[in-house]
Image (cartoon, rainbow, N blue to C red):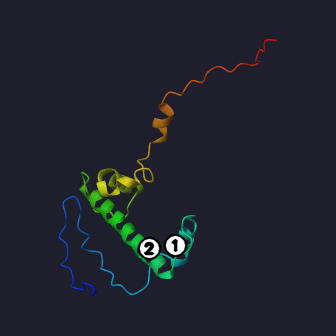
């Protein structure tokens, strides 16, 4: 059976999804990755369910990881500019990533990995859980 090789038209931005940043250069596929392929293979081998992984599979997983990291960074950057007094920032901070994870449904699965931080003084002000008094000696009835 022949494969359908007709090119697809570029997608328009869907509701709830921000378009990619226009000032980022579009990277043409050239067979190289920015993430080290050997390290990705090592991470794949840590999974006990995976017995073997071909070089092509590891390459595709590496490319997909790069695309996901770029998407996460783009969304965090877009949301950081939406804040009141949205000045042009050049550096993404942890809070920008945490805001993107908490506000976007597509990144909600990362809420355990990238939570909002709690300042130390707020943690110290919380009342401590009182522990039950410990008995020095246990009495044993004969």
Q: Quadrant of residue 6?
A: bottom left
| Residue located 41% across and 56% down the image | 94
Q: Nearer the viewer, residue 64 or 8?
A: 8
- Coordinates of residue 123 in the picture (x, y in percent): 48, 36
Q: Identify the residue shown where x is 24% and y is 51%.
A: 84
Kindly state the secondary structure of the residue where label 1 is placed: helix
Q: Quadrant of residue 106?
A: bottom left
Q: Report crowding for label 1: few under 14, some 14 to 19, many 20 or more residues within 10 A (C-alpha).
A: some
Q: CA distance from mark 1 to mark 2?
A: 8 Å
**Residue 81 versus residue 112: which sits nearer the camera?**
112
Q: Count the numbered circles shown.
A: 2
- 86 or 14, nearer to the observer: 14
Left or right: where 134 falls relative to 94: right
Q: Is residue 113 above or below residue 39?
A: above
Secondary structure, mark 2, is helix
Residue under label 2? 61
Give the image location of residue 45, x and y in percent: 57, 70
Residues 75 and 142: in front is 142
Q: Which mark is residue 40?
A: 1
User: Up-down: is 99 above or below 18?
Assistant: above
What residue appears at the point 42 percent right and 49 percent down from the top-left corner? 115
């Amino acid at each position: 059976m022949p494969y359908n090789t007709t090119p697809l038209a570029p997608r328009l931005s869907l509701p709830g999804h921000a378009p990619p940043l226009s000032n980022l250069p579009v990277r043409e596929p050239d067979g190289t990755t920015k993430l080290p392929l050997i390290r990705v293979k090592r991470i794949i081998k840590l999974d006990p369910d995976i017995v073997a992984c071909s070089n092509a599979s590891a390459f595709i997983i590496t490319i997909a990881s790069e695309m996901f990291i770029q998407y996460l960074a783009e969304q965090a950057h877009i949301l950081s500019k939406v804040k009141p007094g949205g000045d042009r920032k050049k550096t993404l901070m942890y809070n920008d990533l945490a805001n993107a994870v908490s506000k976007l449904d597509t990144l909600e699965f990362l809420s355990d990995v990238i939570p909002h931080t709690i300042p130390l003084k707020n943690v110290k002000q919380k009342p401590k859980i009182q522990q039950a008094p410990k008995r020095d000696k246990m009495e044993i009835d004969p």
